[in-house]
Amino acid sequence: MVGPIGDSAEEIKGLQRCIADLVSVLTLPAIWTGGEPHQIVSTLLDVLLGMLHLDFVYGRLNDPTGETPIEMVRVSHSRKLTANPQEIGNLLRNWLGNDPQKWPAVARNPMGDSEISIVPLPLGLQGDVGLIVAGSERTEFPRQTERLLLTVAANQAAIGLQEARLRTEQQRLASELDQRVARRTIELAAVNEGLRREVAERRRAEEALREREESFRLIVDGIARLVAMMTAKGEVELVNRQVLDYFGLTIEDLKDWSIGGVVHSGDLPSVVSAWTHSIETGSPYDIDHRLRRADGVYRWFHARGLPLLDSDEKIVRWYVLLTDIDDRRRAEEAQKRSEAFLTEGQHLSRTGSFSWRVATDDIVWSEQMYRIFEFGQDVPVTFERICTRVHPEDVPSLNALNDRVRVEGGDFEFEHRLLMPDRSVKYLHMVAHGTQDPEGRLEYIGAVQDVTQRRASEEELGKARLELTRVARITTLGTMTASIAHEVNQPLSGIITNAGTCLRMLSADPPDVDGARETARRTIRDGNRASDVINRLRALFSKKDAAAESVDLNEATKEVIALSVSELQRNRVIPVLELAEDLPLVTGDRVQLQQVIINLLRNASDAMSAVNDRPRQLVIRTERDEGDHVRLTMQDEGVGLDPQAMDKLFEAFYTTKNDGMGIGLSVSRSIIESHSGRLWATTNNGPGATFSFSIPRRSGRSTSADRDRETRTRAATDAL
Ligand code: ADP
C-alpha cells in the first residue's frame, strides 16, 4: 500500500483511467451495432486484454440452439499459447467445475509455470449467453476498478450479444419468413399453375364434352330408333328426338313412364319387374313390349338397356335402345299362323311335304311326313330308313324311280305302299317338282298324300259302281227279258211239241210205253219249269218303277265325273267340261241317266286307252237343244267308229272288246228312249267319236209297267 497523498494521486489517476476505460467500454455497443455475436465477443476480448493488461482472456458464446458453443481466447503478446480455445475451455471446466455459476469470483491456480488469478464473468442473467474468463498473473488482479470494468464490459457485451442474438434471430426469422414466403409463393405459384392448367383442362374437357354431347346428340337423333338415357334409378334423363316424336310427349311427361298408359297395361307388370331386376342387379334389360304412339296406337318394341358403370362397378346411368319390331312381329305372327295353317292343312289332308337335294341326299320332311311314316322326328331321314317302311313289293319300283329321277330332273308322280310295323298297309301318292337349290343343283320339292282312305273309299266306290252296273244291267235285263222269254219260249214250245209227237210214236206197237211216257212227261215238266223260271225272272225285274224326278243334268254329270276321277286319271284322260250355265232341269230317273253318262264315259275312256300320240282329251258338253230338249255330248279323241259297224253299235251283245258284254249302248239307248229321248253316235272330223243324247225337259216317260205290258202284247201277237 502507498502513502495517502501519493496514493491519492495514484488513486485519482487510477480512477481517471478507470473512467476513461469505462467510457471506452460504454462506447463498445455503438461499435457492436449490427455486428455478429462472435464479432462482439472477439472485440470484447481484444478490448479487455489491452485495457486491463491481462495475460489471457477466454470467451465462450453459447449457442441458443444447443449447437457447439463458439470459444475464443486471447493472450498477451508476451505469452506463447499453444493450446486452442476448446482445450482452454476444457481446462477451465476441469479446474473449476462444470457449472460456471459455482465458480469463485476469483481463483488462483497455477497455469503453466506461474500463478494466475482468474475472474469468471457470466454473460447474461444465468450465464446463459456465455462466459468470459479474464486472467492475469498480477497479484492484485482484479483490482476494484478492474472488476467494475470487467462487470460493466460483461454486461455491455451481454446486452450487445442479446441484441445481436435478437437481431440474428430476427434476421433468421425474417429470412426464414422470407424463405417461407418464397416457398409458399413458389408453392402457390405451382398451385396457381396447376389450377390454371386445371381450369384450362376443364375448359377443354367441357368443350370436348360439349362437342361430344353435340355429336352424341347428332348420332342419337340420327339413329332411326328410340334412344333414352336413364338415371341409375331408372328415371328418364335424356331422350332423342325420335322418342318425343313417337310419344308426342315432352321429356317431363316421360319422366314417370310407368303411369299414363305409355306402356301397354298388359305388358306393364313384366316391364316394371324386368326394370327393377336390372336396376338392382345391373344385368342388361331386354324385353319386348308395346308402347303407345302419339295417335294412341300401340306398337311392339324391343327394349334393350345397358348400364354404364364407374370404376367401382357402380351404375352411373342406363342407355336404353327401343327398336320398333311391330311389322316384324306381325309378319312373324302371320308366318306362324300360316305355318300352323299349313301344318293343320297337311294334317287334315294327310299330305306331307318334302325336299330332297339329290347331290347330297339331304332330305327334309314336314311334320306330317313323319306322321305318315310313323317315324320319330329325332332321327334324320335317309333312303335306307324310308325303305324300311316301303312295302317290299314296291321297293324295286321305288329304287328304279330313284335311279331315273336322279339324272332326269323334271317332275314325277308315283304311287306306292307302306307296310307299317303292325302289318297294316298305307297307300301313298307322291308328286314332286324338280327345281334347283341355291347352288344350282337338282332339288325336288314334293308332296306325299296318304291316300289309304281314298283308296278304301275308291274300292268301296268301285264295288258300289259294280253294284250299280249290275243293277242297271238287271234293269236292262227287264227290258231284255221280253225278247229272251220270246226266244226261249219258242224252243220250249218245240220241246213240248216234240214230246207230244214222242208220246204219239210211243203209242205205236211195240213200244216201251211206260218208259217213253215217263220220259216225255219229264221233258214236258222240265220245259214248263224252264218257262216258269224265265217268266218269274221277268216278273221280278219288271217290278221296279223308274223314278220321275227333276234332274239337273250338269250336277248329275259332275257327280259322275267326281266318281270316276281316279279311273280317268289312271287312264290319263283329261276331262274338259263345257256345261251350259242356264241348262233347264229335266224330268227323269237320275240314276238311270247317270248310268248312261257312265257308259258313254267308260266307252270314251276305253276308246282312248291305246292313244299315245295325242292328249286323251274328252269334251263333255251340255246345252239346250231344239224343241225344248236338253242335249249332252261326249266327244273323245279315241280310235273312232268303223262306218260298217255304225248300225250294230246299239245292238245288244255287240262288242269289239275282249272283256266287253256289248250291252252298255243298248241299255243306254233303251234308258234314253224311255225318257222319250234319242241317243246317237257320229264320227268326228278329226280322230275319235262323239256320242250324244237329247231328251225333252218333260219326258212324259213311260214306266216299266207300261213297257212290260207292251212287251207282253208284242209276245202274244208274235205267238199268234
Ligand atoms: P261294250 O262296251 O261292253 O263293248 P257297248 O254296248 O257299250 O258294249 O259298246 C259296244 C261297242 O261300241 C264297243 O265294243 C265299241 O266297239 C263301240 N263303241 C262304243 N263307244 C265307242 C267309242 N266312244 N268309240 C269307239 N267305239 C265305241
Image: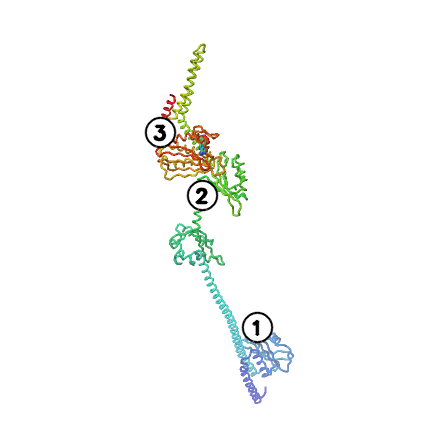
Q: Which residue is mark 3?
A: 702
Quadrant, the C terminus: top left
Residue 185 visible to the viewer: yes
Q: Is disc 2 in contact with disc 1, using a CB cutoff of under 8 Å?
A: no
Furthest toward the bottom, the residue is 5
**Which amino acid type is marked by label 2?**
Leu
| Image vertical order of residue 50 relative to residue 547, above or below | below
Q: CA distance from mark 3 to mark 1?
A: 163 Å
Q: Is disc 2 in contact with disc 3, using a CB cutoff of under 8 Å?
A: no
- The crowding category of the residue bearing disc 2, from other C-alpha atoms within 10 Å (few below 14, some 14 to 19, many at least 20), is some
Q: Which residue is mark 2?
A: 342
- The crowding category of the residue bearing disc 1, from other C-alpha atoms within 10 Å (few below 14, some 14 to 19, many at least 20), is few
Q: Residue at x 64, y 82 (%)?
A: 78
To which quarter of the image does residue 684 belong? top left
What is the x, y in percent for residue 587?
35, 33
* Closer to viewer: mark 2 or mark 3: 3
- Determine whether the residue tagged by mark 3 lies in a helix, strand or loop: loop
Q: Is disc 3 in contact with disc 1, using a CB cutoff of under 8 Å?
A: no
- Residue closest to the eye, 57 or 697: 697
Q: Earlier in the sequence, mark 2 or mark 1?
A: 1
Q: Which residue is mark 1?
A: 67
Q: CA distance from mark 2 to mark 1?
A: 109 Å
| Image vertical order of residue 476 relative to residue 121, above or below | above
- Residue closest to the eye, 480 or 48: 480
